[in-house]
């Protein structure tokens, strides 16, 4: 398990080999290239904002990088606790285990289980990883407290505000020690003050530990909080990082 007492900026002196690398990523749906040859590296301590118009391929890129969908061509390499893994070569069952144990997810809504309490939601991935319930819940409680949710452990998700629910999602994404956290419009349903608070919590929980964050957003204020921004258009990176051409 991974404890929530972050040493200040563990990334500052760390070697900056990428935690996550995509090369030549291509994905077509019929005649449409959702991704048309994307290269991307994400290093420890980086928060990368992915921006671009609706339909430009942002969610597809996030899902390919996270091993949720496989690309038609190209490679995704993740540095795991046990070494580099070529994510797109793994079977679905292995990718599912990798997502559960090595990656964290904070989406706009819907990933928390409404029938479970805050502490049960955070403890769930730990229990799936084999930790006994009591230890998992104690650990989950520490993460909730670190995200300012002490006293709300036993509330169901529906009894929390939108911003509080997103903090539960952040706690859950970090409790297993995920070194790369993926967020798709994590503040899309929040007002601007709450959105700023949730971004602060998300950045604190990841970057200060030398972990990395990949965040899809439409919000320039969210992007401005990140360490860099890449912009997609028609499945290509048009700003922020090199894109390789593919025949189409
Ligand atoms: P964004 O997140 O930037 O709005 P997406 O990655 O969701 O963009 O989609 C990129 C393109 O791929 C769009 O043209 C979209 O319609 C298409 N697309 C995405 N997913 C699918 C799918 N499962 N089936 C068919 N087309 C899809
Ligand atoms: Mg999208």
Image (cartoon, rainbow, N blue to C red):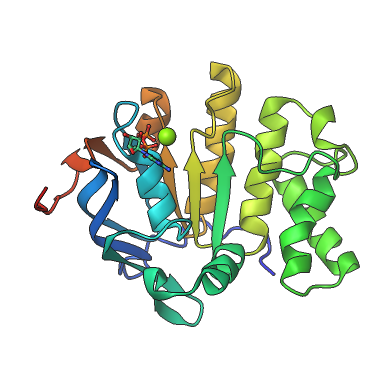
The image shows residue 217, relative to residue 40, as above or below, that is above
Instruction: Between residue 244 and residue 133, name the one nearer to us.
Output: 244
Single out the residue that lies furthest toward the bottom: 82
Quadrant of the rendering where the N terminus is positioned = bottom right
Identified at 32% across, 39% down, the residue is 57
The quadrant in which residue 17 appears is: bottom left
Find residue 191 and report its horizontal and vertical position in percent: 58, 17
* Count of numbered badges drawn on the protein: 0
Identified at 14% across, 50% down, the residue is 242
Identified at 54% across, 74% down, the residue is 94
Instruction: Between residue 164 and residue 121, name the one nearer to us.
Output: 121
Single out the residue that lies furthest toward the front: 30
Q: Is residue 124 left or right of residue 70?
A: right
Identified at 33% across, 59% down, the residue is 71
Asked if residue 5 can be seen in this view, the reply is: no
Find residue 95 and report its horizontal and vertical position in percent: 51, 68
The image shows residue 161, relative to residue 226, as above or below, that is above
Q: Is residue 150 left or right of residue 186?
A: right
């Amino acid at each position: 398990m991974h404890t929530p007492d972050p040493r200040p900026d563990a990334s500052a002196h760390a070697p900056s080999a990428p935690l996550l690398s995509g090369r030549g990523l291509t994905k077509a749906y019929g005649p449409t290239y959702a991704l048309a040859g994307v290269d991307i590296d994400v290093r420890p301590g980086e928060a990368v904002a992915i921006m671009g118009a609706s339909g430009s391929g942002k969610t597809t890129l996030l899902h390919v990088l996270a091993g949720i969908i496989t690309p038609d061509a190209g490679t995704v390499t993740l540095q795991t606790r046990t070494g580099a893994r070529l994510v797109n070569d793994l079977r679905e069952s292995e990718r599912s285990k990798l997502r559960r144990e090595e990656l964290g997810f904070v989406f706009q809504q819907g990933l928390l289980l409404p029938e479970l309490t805050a502490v049960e939601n955070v403890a769930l991935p730990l229990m799936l990883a084999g930790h006994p319930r009591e230890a998992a819940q104690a650990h989950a409680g520490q993460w909730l407290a670190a995200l300012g949710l002490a006293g709300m452990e036993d509330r169901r998700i529906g009894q929390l505000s939108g911003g509080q629910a997103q903090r539960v999602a952040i706690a859950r994404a970090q409790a297993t020690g995920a070194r790369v956290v993926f967020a798709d419009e994590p503040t899309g349903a929040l007002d601007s003050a709450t959105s700023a608070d949730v971004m602060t919590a998300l950045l604190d929980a990841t970057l200060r530990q030398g972990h990395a964050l990949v965040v899809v957003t439409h919000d320039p204020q969210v992007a401005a909080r990140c360490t860099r921004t890449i912009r997609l258009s028609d499945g290509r990176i048009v700003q922020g990082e090199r894109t390789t051409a593919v025949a189409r």
